[in-house]
Amino acid sequence: MPGRLEGKVALITGAGSGIGLESCILFAKEGAKIVAADVNEETGRATVKKIEEQYGAKSAIFVKVDVSKEDQIKNAVEVAEKEFGRMVIGKLNIVFNNAGIMHPDDDNAITTEERVWDLTFTINVKGVWWGCKHAIPALRRAGGGSIINTASFVALRGAATPQLAYTSSKGAVLAMTRELATIHARENIRVNALCPGPLRTPLLMDFLNTEEKKQRRLVHVPMGRFGEAIEQAYSALFLASDESSYITGSEFAVDGGLTAAY
Ligand code: NAD
């Protein structure tokens, strides 16, 4: 049986860890060719190695990308089209703007420093903008496609352990997603936001660096546990595939019930 992404090419940022890593492997399993992009060369290359071991040489390539640098994102899109455009399969079809940071010094309105705010917005917001800016012409060339932007549940609710820059940046990702979905809907380009709940990945586990902080966050999760990156990857797969062909501009909450709770 053909995979759910057979014949597609997917560019995934933050490919070296967590959601990005699991999505690269799952998308490859479903037949996509993967362009794995990460600022961390070691972990990004390790992702590609894992995919090639399972799905053969040329099933994935690594591109070093710092998403806060426009020229590096532009290059990744060009690599995706050039490397995989030469093969039987098509051009770029899926762009998963997933890379993001949670700064250790992010805090409340009074204590968060401007440098923390600026770095968070440069990576989390500009990075998604650059990703969309360079993906859209490529997806047009491919006759349409799917963009998935990783936001967060904190874009839908305030975080009880304060991280104002992060929360605000993810709100911007949601707003950007809605507008892009509206503007490009008739070009067969769908744009959706994934809104994960709290996950057991390095990003959050490093930020919630005491047991008390971890438990404080779990109080709000009806399922009473942190989510796993693979649970996000399955939802990203749905948004990437043609199974979600009538879904655009959505806030896709995958959060153990967090945003449903009082
Ligand atoms: P993670 O730490 O496991 O992985 C993040 C990856 O992004 C790493 O491989 C890192 O090297 C890469 N990265 C960081 N800065 C980068 C940059 N400037 N350019 C390119 N790559 C960069 O984290 P994760 O939990 O998988 O997070 C992925 C996304 O999910 C992020 O956007 C994050 O904000 C979001 N998110 C995470 C949670 C959570 O609880 N972990 C919840 C909601 C949303």
Image (cartoon, rainbow, N blue to C red):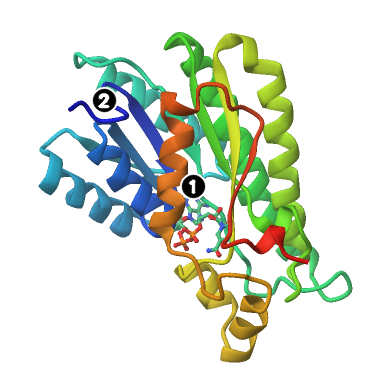
Residue at 35%, 17% in the rendered image: 91
Near-viewer residue (64 or 243): 243
Give the answer, above or below, for where 213 lies relative to 114.
below
Three-letter residue code for mark 1: Asp
Mark 2 = which residue? 6
Give the answer, above or below, for where 199 lies relative to 39.
below
Seen in the image, is 113 located left or right of residue 177? Answer: right
Q: Nearer the viewer, mark 2 or mark 1?
A: 2
Residue 257: where, in percent of width, then height?
62, 61
SS under mark 1: loop
SS under mark 2: loop
**Image quadrant of residue 228?**
bottom left
Give the answer, above or below, for where 63 lies relative to 214.
above
Residue at 59%, 75% in the rendered image: 207
Seen in the image, is 136 located left or right of residue 185? Answer: left
Task: Let me know if residue 119 appears in the view.
Answer: no
Residue at 41%, 39% in the rendered image: 237
Residue 198: where, in percent of width, then height?
57, 66
How many marks are shown on the rendered structure?
2
Q: Is mark 1 within 8 Å of ligand 1?
A: yes
